[in-house]
Amino acid sequence: MNRKEKTIGEKIKEWRKMKDLTQDALAKKADMPYTTLAKIESDVIQNPSLQTITKIADGLGITIDNLIKN
């Protein structure tokens, strides 16, 4: 069975839940608007900038590699 690769938004959401953070808490840690994070997690924004991904990874306390790998 061929599973589709998770979107960056799905990966961020998984990590956020593993770290027991709300969207609001992660947005604050990542120094970004809550709405931006919510749009990324819901795949409204599908290709966030590297700067944005870096902020989110920092907010989660993980590396970009951790975030973009399956």
Image: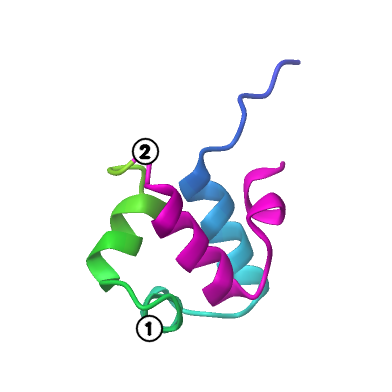
* Location of mark 2 (residue): 46
Which x, y percent locates residue 63?
68, 62
- Does residue 40 belong to the magenta stretch? no
> What secondary structure do most residues of the magenta stretch adopt?
helix
Which x, y percent locates residue 7?
51, 38
Q: Disc 2 residue type?
A: Gln
Q: Disc 1 residue type?
A: Lys
Which x, y percent locates residue 1?
76, 15
Q: Residue at x 65, y 75 (%)?
A: 61
Looking at the rendering, the stretch of residues picked out in magenta corresponds to 46-70
- Does residue 55 belong to the magenta stretch? yes
User: Tag on residue 66?
Assistant: none
Which x, y percent locates residue 55?
46, 67
With 13 as the anchor, is 63 left or right in this view?
A: right
**Pointer 2: residues within 10 angstroms few (<14), some, or many (20+)?**
few
User: What whole-number distance in Å separates the C-alpha atoms at marks 1 and 2?
Assistant: 21 Å
Q: Which residue is drawn at 36% across and 80% down?
A: 24
Element at label 2: loop
* Upstream in sequence: badge 1 or badge 2: 1
